[in-house]
Amino acid sequence: MQENYIKQTEEVPEYTYLNLGPTHPATHGIFENVLTMDGEIVKGSVQTVGYIHRAFEKIAERRPYYQITTLTDRLNYCSSPINNMGWHMTVEKLIGVEIPKRAQYMRVILMELSRITDHLICNSVMGVDTGALTGFTYMFQWREKVYDIYEQICGARLTTNIGRIGGMERDFTDKAYRLINEFIRDFPKAFEEFNTMLERNRIFFDRTINTGAISAERALNYGFTGPSLRACGVDYDVRVMNPYSSYEDFEFDIPVGEKGDSYDRFMVRQHEIRESIKIIKQALNNMPDGKFHADVPEFYLPPKEDVYKNMEALIWHFKIVMGESDVPKGEVYHAVEGGNGELGFYLISDGGRAPYKLHFRRPSFIYYQAFPEQITGGMLSDAIVTMSSMNVIAGELDA
């Protein structure tokens, strides 16, 4: 690692080394960059990751399948339900279960609400890092309204553990529907007020346009996905390329940029928020009738009232909790469109109570490797904005 630093020689100016992180407020997480600086100009950067590495993949080898959901919460904790649903769909793919259409639409609503909150956090933080705090504090009240919806559905707010293998743990209540409808009715107006502060702001233009730019070719070489790739002009979206959870039923656009700079990444997320609202409205208006979970008693916990008075329900409850359900041998990969890009789960089963191997494809970990290339030659203040626009989440970066 040391050899990546620019050497001090008599032929070059005197450089200084700056630790950007691991506890710098501008990193918005626990990770570090050691910057080689020539005054205000970044001449090189070395990333240090692993500060909150929690060995999730190794822990998963010792946990029953349904308990792994709580690990996925703590990847990108700004959009936990997307992680939860992605894991459930991976196990369903392994065991060959098709969940009811109603449960799929319910999942779509939750995943799109999660995408909205994820993008809101990223873009409002970009405002903070360019000197505009107001939008951040204003938008956070809308994030809390989404968390009210989560709490009504599953009882949790941030690390949700929402849904189950086989569908949803319960149907949406009348209050949950009311909160969702109120959100999609009231949020767009507030969101457009946030837009007017930044989208056409001259100071924001100067701070973000041509900052942290990367070409489509370089982004693809690094393995970029999500808003960071679409900002470069590549219209790759897992929801369209490999539809899951009935996304093929919905009409929505894939926003793309041109330069792959910080402003394009900001604008792609802005437009995706609008598209998510469209998807949620379609899901609510066309919500199918039927059950909210598949008939898979070996994986889906029976109702608690049945466990107290029905022997068969008690047996299934015990087998599921203790991880005694038979799981077929196999090897599967399933990906969803997370807040930051393609969130993938590569699962190998040897038929045991826990995965033989589970690998998380974490988009933040993949595109963070391009950060030195994006900031070298720019100013320190540009490096901060670039990092914000990439939305590097420490929990997803380290896992």
Image (spheres, rainbow, N blue to C red):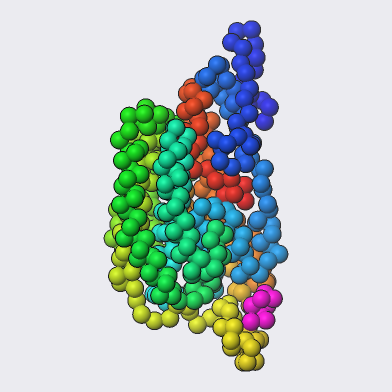
* Residue drawn at (62%, 86%) of the image: 307
What residue lies at 47% left-to-right and 56% top-to-bottom?
Answer: 144
Q: Quadrant of residue 123?
A: top left
Residue 245 appears left or right of 66:
left
Q: In x, y percent, where is residue 235?
A: 34, 47
Q: Is residue 36 above or below residue 141?
A: above
Task: Give the x, y percent position of residue 58.
Answer: 69, 57
Q: Position of residue 52 (x, y in %)?
A: 66, 46
Question: Which region shows up in magenta?
Answer: 317-325
Placement of the N terminus among the 4 image quadrants = top right
Q: Residue furthest top?
A: 10
Looking at the image, is 207 positioned above or below residue 333? above
Whether residue 87 is visible, yes or no, is: no
Quadrant housing residue 251: bottom left
Q: Is residue 129 left or right of residue 74?
A: left
Q: Can residue 113 be seen in the rendering of this structure? A: yes
How many discs appear?
0
Measured as percent of width and height from the top left, residue 329 is found at 61, 71
Is 319 covered by the magenta stretch?
Answer: yes
User: Would you place residue 20 above or below residue 114 in this image?
Assistant: above
Q: Quadrant of residue 29?
A: top right
Residue 36 forms part of the magenta stretch: no
